[in-house]
């Protein structure tokens, strides 16, 4: 063991090695130290014969080769573009809503120059970052006031903390939901300082359940959209207009966490649009910017001016503040909506894609894949999903290609294409490529990927 330990090279020798002469010394040193330390720990463990054997074969060359490998992967960018063939449009794991080159081009000058993000040019003094988008949102939604924070989770936190600190927040037991990534509505309400007042049951909540729970310490009735699941069977929930009425009657606040709101462009939606919700005049409502809205990460809040003024005075706001990139993106996305330019909003363009268009795309890809002898491909009907915790119950009829390989197992083939950046689904032992989220330049790339792995 001592022997092995003494075989490990000194860190100074590695740092002075000419093969590392173009490396950043601080990074190299850290990587080499961590690597050698891990080796030392393995040597001292000594109980595993196999590892001991491997360690005996370690020499200086091998050690430096491994350090070089770690250095390379640390240095290279780990984020890469992927081809989304899952048919899930706002896929949270794949970055949710993506942007169009058109909108990126529009905001690039703003990002590369100083700008009036918080500067009022007319009077030469500090301005407000929220003003740039407020008027467009109010115009589109017909609401009194609007406001934006970092994301919708931040909107929930800020609203509860501002209006319900040490006060009761009335919520249906059917809406104590988890959104994903450990975001649970009841926990957020408690973290924000609110007191949970659960009403009703998991499957049924009635208006009188809410009404009976209202007391002197009630501050707010919250309605939370069941974003990522659907209850069926013996169920009842109270519609938001009834809750707004009830809150008015008792002079408390109604707040609707819409989750994934959509503005327009989804003609067959089974859920109300943001405009329809706004027409009910909720005291406060909020939704995510990067789900079905198709914009940047943001939490968009709309409702009564007096309430939004109070949100702006909460000291927590600084920690939840929306950054300039999101404001620029949001403004450009809203403008695209004003002009019904859905091509500029990929999420909307993809969800609105016509079946004939998807069918044509599938035929083109089929043609590109047919020369690859090891593949058996056929055209199939599929159902795409909106994703990102939106419209869980709704299918978007789509078209795709099913693929099996003549010798490789489907799972193995899928691992290979995934490692080359093509994300697909497997069903009935076939690889499924859904056309909905594929752009025209992806088709030739997909052909290349299958040529390389087959
Ligand atoms: C997605 C979602 C959130 C969280 O929104 P983010 O923008 O991801 O922070 C909160 N509430 C509901 C109902 C949601 O669907």
Image (spheres, rainbow, N blue to C red):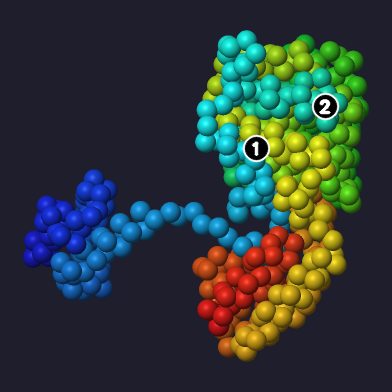
Q: How many marks?
A: 2
The quarter of the picture where the N terminus appears is: bottom left
Q: Is mark 2 within 8 Å of ligand 1?
A: no
Would you name the residue on which mark 1 appears? 329
* Position of 168 relative to 387 (above/below): above
Badge 2 element: helix
Q: Residue at x 35, y 53 (%)?
A: 75
How far apart are labels 1 and 2 at the CA level? 18 Å
Decide which of 182, 112 is in the foreground and name it: 112
Q: Residue at x 59, y 23 (%)?
A: 116
Is residue 156 visible to the viewer in this orientation of the structure? no
In the image, 405 versus 168, the foreground residue is 405
**x%, y% of residue 307?**
74, 15
- Above or below, 280 relative to 23: above
Can I make out residue 325 in this image?
A: yes
Label 1 neighbourhood size at 10 Å, few (<14), some (14-19), many (20+)?
many
In this figure, which residue is indicated by the disc labeled 2?
Answer: 139
Establish if 39 lies above or below 182. Answer: below
User: Quadrant of residue 353 in the image?
Assistant: bottom right
Residue 282 position by quadrant: top right
Q: Classify residue 338 as left or right of residue 88.
A: right
Residue 227, image quadrant? top right
């Amino acid at each position: 063991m001592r022997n092995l330990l003494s075989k490990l090279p000194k860190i100074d020798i590695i740092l002075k090695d000419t093969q590392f002469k173009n490396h950043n010394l601080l990074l190299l040193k850290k990587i080499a130290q961590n690597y050698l330390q891990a080796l030392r720990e393995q040597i001292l463990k000594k109980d595993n014969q196999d590892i001991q054997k491997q360690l005996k074969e370690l020499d200086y060359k091998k050690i430096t080769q491994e350090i070089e490998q770690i250095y390379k992967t640390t240095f290279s960018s780990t984020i890469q573009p992927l081809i989304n063939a899952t048919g899930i449009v706002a896929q949270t794991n794949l970055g949710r809503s993506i942007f169009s080159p058109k909108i990126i081009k529009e905001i690039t000058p703003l990002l590369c120059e100083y700008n009036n993000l918080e500067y009022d040019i007319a009077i030469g003094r500090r301005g407000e970052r929220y003003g740039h988008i407020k008027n467009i949102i109010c115009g589109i939604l017909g609401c009194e006031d609007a406001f934006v924070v970092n994301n919708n989770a931040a909107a929930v936190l800020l609203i509860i903390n501002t209006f319900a600190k040490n006060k009761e927040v009335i919520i249906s037991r059917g809406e104590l939901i988890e959104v994903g990534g450990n975001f649970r509505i009841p926990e957020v309400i408690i973290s924000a300082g609110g007191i949970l007042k659960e009403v009703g049951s998991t499957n049924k909540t009635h208006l009188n359940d809410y009404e009976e729970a209202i007391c002197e310490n009630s501050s707010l009735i919250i309605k939370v959209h069941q974003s990522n699941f659907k209850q069926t069977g013996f169920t009842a929930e109270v519609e938001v207009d009834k809750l707004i009425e009830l809150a008015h009657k008792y002079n408390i606040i109604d707040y609707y966490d819409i989750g994934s709101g959509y503005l327009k462009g989804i003609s067959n939606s089974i859920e109300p649009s943001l405009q329809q919700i706004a027409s009910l005049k909720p005291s406060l409502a909020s939704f995510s910017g990067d789900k079905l809205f198709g914009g940047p990460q943001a939490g968009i809040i709309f409702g009564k001016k007096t309430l939004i003024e109070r949100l702006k005075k909460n000291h927590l706001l600084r920690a939840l503040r929306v950054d300039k990139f999101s404001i620029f993106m949001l403004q450009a996305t809203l403008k695209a909506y004003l002009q019904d330019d859905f091509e500029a909003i990929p999420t909307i363009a993809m969800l609105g894609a016509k079946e004939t268009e998807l069918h044509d795309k599938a035929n083109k890809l089929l043609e590109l894949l047919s020369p690859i002898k090891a593949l058996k491909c056929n055209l199939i009907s599929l159902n795409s999903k909106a994703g990102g915790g939106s419209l869980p119950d709704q299918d978007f009829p789509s078209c795709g290609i099913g693929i099996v390989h003549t010798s490789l197992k489907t799972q193995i083939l899928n691992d290979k294409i995934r490692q080359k950046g093509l994300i697909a689904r497997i069903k009935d032992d076939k690889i499924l490529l859904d056309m909905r989220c594929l752009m025209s330049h992806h088709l030739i790339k997909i052909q290349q990927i299958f040529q390389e792995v087959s």
